[in-house]
Image (cartoon, grey):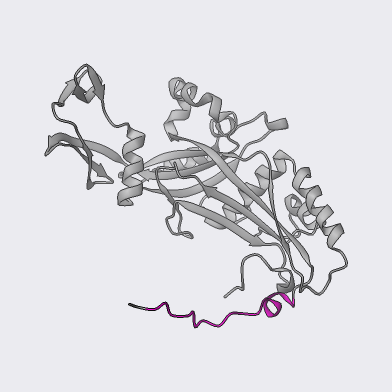
Amino acid sequence: MTKNQPDKKPKRDPAQLFGGKRFDVEHALNMYATSFVLMPAFGIYEEKIVAAFKPHLAKCHIYVIGTMPAIETVDQRLEDGRLVIVILVAGKRHELAWPMPDGVELVETERGWFIKNGDGYWAPSDEEMARRLNDEQDAIGFEVLYIGQAYGKDGSRNALDRLLKHETLQRISVKGVPPDRRLTLLMLEIEPGNRMITFMNPWAENKEEGSARISAGLDKLFGTSDAERVTLYEASLIRYFQPPFNKEFKESFPSTNLKVLADCYDKDFSALISEICIDELPFKMTSDAVQPSQYHTAKFDLHEDEARQVFFGKKT
């Protein structure tokens, strides 16, 4: 019987790790997307497509212009008790299979192919097939080309309003995308409330201002407006993904010179975090600067001084 071996990795003394930090209370502002709308770029001009998503679009103030691989179903068959569907993703062949009960048959109707089981008809949706291709075969990537926002007065403008007259979208469309890719729009709803992550450090140099710093953090937590939240989220994603068609924020964020960060610096926050962590996205987002992943966390220290950097570990 093999005995558990003790962990020989030396444990680091927390007093050494955090003893040189400035304050005993540090805050990070955390924002994240909660839901999304995905449609082909031409869909914004189609009334039926827009109508189907209208309730959700009203809450989406962030938009991402990108490309996805062309997806085409080329064959479907019943084989060894399974429904097998053959799909081309950017020209590459993939197969998906579903176990089927005895007695079903594959039939063609005016609406396409279906599995007929007695009086019932069923077929996997495009969304289900895309999700399985992404989850099981890592076959679908969303390449980020541009990130923007629309808010207006009191949230009166949403992403769709902005995209209908968007010069960059039109420029990308005119320039064209590779024949095996499709121009696609991802619109995100940001959680309407903030989250604040607070780090309390008993080894810090300054332990006299803790109460005041907690109060300032709460002011920022509850005092950040929706418009400010949208802009902070947009700027951090641009800095993170480095989309080729964006210009602002790619190099300048974060900075004490940016108006959008003025209140974060005024309340002396030390970090900012923006997340896209949505299991239901049927692709992995990527760019020239970021590897494909289902989940993305754009995280930034707001101060160059290492004594203020407590959330993300030591930079290499």
62 relative position to 15: left or right: left
Residue 222 location (% of width, % of height): 77, 44
Residue 194 in view of the camera: yes
Please determine whether, in this image, residue 12 is positioned above or below residue 275.
below
Please determine whether, in this image, residue 284 is positioned above or below residue 22.
above
* Residue drawn 23% across the image and 24% down it: 112
Q: Which residues are magenta?
A: 3-20
- As drawn, the residue found furthest toward the left would be 80
In this view, the residue in front, 246 or 77, is 77
65 relative position to 309: left or right: left
In this view, the residue in front, 58 or 157, is 58
193 is within the stretch colored magenta: no
* Residue drawn 31% across the image and 49% down it: 136
In this view, the residue in front, 16 or 186, is 16
* Residue drawn 48% across the image and 41% down it: 171
In the rendered view of the protein, which quadrant contains the C terminus?
bottom right
